[in-house]
Amino acid sequence: MRAQALPTAVDSKRYLALSGGVGGAKLAAGLAQALPAESLVVAVNIGDDFEHLGLTICPDLDTVLYTLAGVVHPQQGWGRADESFGVLEELRRLDGDSWFSLGDRDIALHLLRRQLLAQGLSLSQVSAELAHRLGVTVTVLPVSDQPVRTTVHTDQGSLAFQDYFVRLRCEPVLRGLEFKGAAQARLAPALRELLASPELAGVIICPSNPYLSLAPMLAITELRESLRALRAPVLAVSPIVAGDAIKGPTAKIMRELGVQPHAGVIAELYADFVDAVIIDEADAELAGTDSRFVVAPTVMQTLDQKTTLARHCIALAEKLRS
Ligand code: FO1
C-alpha cells in the first residue's frame, strides 16, 4: 500500500511592521510586494489622530491604507491622488476651519469611518472594513483601539499634534512630548494575538519618525514589554541617512531635543528590544561601530526600491532566526 502523501507544509510565518505615516507606508508597500497578504500585519501609530469638524481623523492609518490601495497622492505621500477640494473651498468661504487640508474623496472615507464608529465598531474593526472597501488585503490595524494623543510641548506652549505639525508647520521649538492615553491603552486584540503567536517570524520597525510616530506606539507598556520579551527578531530601519531625515522634521526635532541626528541613534532609542538596525549605504562607515548595524539601500522612491528594502528586512529576519 502506498503511503499517503503528506500535505504540503503551509508556510504560516507572519511579519509585523510597525509604521507611522509616509516613510513607514513606503516600506509597508514594499513588504506587501515581497510577502503574501496573509503574512503581513501593519500596526499603525494613532498619536496623530484627532477630532476635526466632527470627524475622527487618523492620518497615519489612512496614509498606510491609501498607499497599499495604490491611491495615495504620489508627491505628498498622504491624502488621495486625483483629489478635489470642493468642501474645503466652501468651508473657507463660510469662514469654517480650513487649515487642515481634507479633500472630497478623503472626506467620504471619514464620513464612512464616522458612521462605523457610531455603530459601535472598534477602530480596529473600522480599519479592517475600510481596508476591505479600498481593496487592501494586507491586515492594517491601529496599535490600540483606545485613543493615544500626542501633545507637543514647545516654546509656544503645549500644542495638540496636528496644531504643531500642520497648522504651525513644526516651526515651534520642541521641548518635550507627551502621549496622552498611552498609560491606559491596551494593544489592539489582533496585535496582542500576533505578538504571542509562534507564527510571528519578525518585527520590522519602519523608517518612521522615532519621536513623533514610533514613540507614541512604544509608550504603550504592553507593546514595549512584548518586544523586549519576544523570541522572534526585531529589526529597525533607520530614517536618518547621512545625518539628515529623508523627509519630514526628524532631524530638526532631534537637534531641538539635543540629540545629534545620525543613523546610529535608532540603535540607542530601541536598545532594549532591537536585534538589528538597517542603515543606509551612505552611513556604511558606522557599520563597524555596532554589531547590530546592517547596511542596505534604504532610500525608497520607486516600488522596486521599496520591495528591495523589504526583501533585505525579510532576509535579515530569517538570518537572525537561524
Ligand atoms: N499634512 C500637512 O502638512 N497638511 C495638511 O493639510 C494635511 C492634511 C491631511 C489630511 C488627511 C490626512 O490623512 C493627512 C493629512 N496631512 C496633512 C498629513 C498628516 O497630518 C501628517 O503627515 C501626519 O500626521 C504625520 O505622520
Image: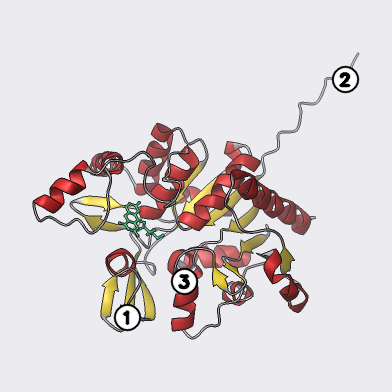
Closer to the camera: disc 2 or disc 3?
A: 3
| Residue shown at the point (16%, 57%) measured from the top left | 97
Q: Which of disc 3 and disc 1 is earlier in sequence?
A: 1
Q: Specify whether 215 is left or right of 268.
A: left
**What number is the disc on residue 3?**
2
Mark 2–mark 3 Cα distance, whole angstroms, equals: 58 Å
User: Percent position (x, y) of residue 219?
Assistant: 45, 69
User: Percent position (x, y) of residue 123?
Assistant: 35, 48
Whether tag 1 and tag 3 are in contact, CB under 8 A, the answer is no
Amino acid type at image mark 3: Tyr
User: Percent position (x, y) of residue 124?
Assistant: 40, 46
Any part of residue 230 in sight: no
User: Quadrant location of the C terminus?
Assistant: bottom right
| Residue shown at the point (49%, 86%) measured from the top left | 258
Give the structural element (helix, strand or loop) at label 1.
strand
User: Quadrant location of the N terminus?
Assistant: top right
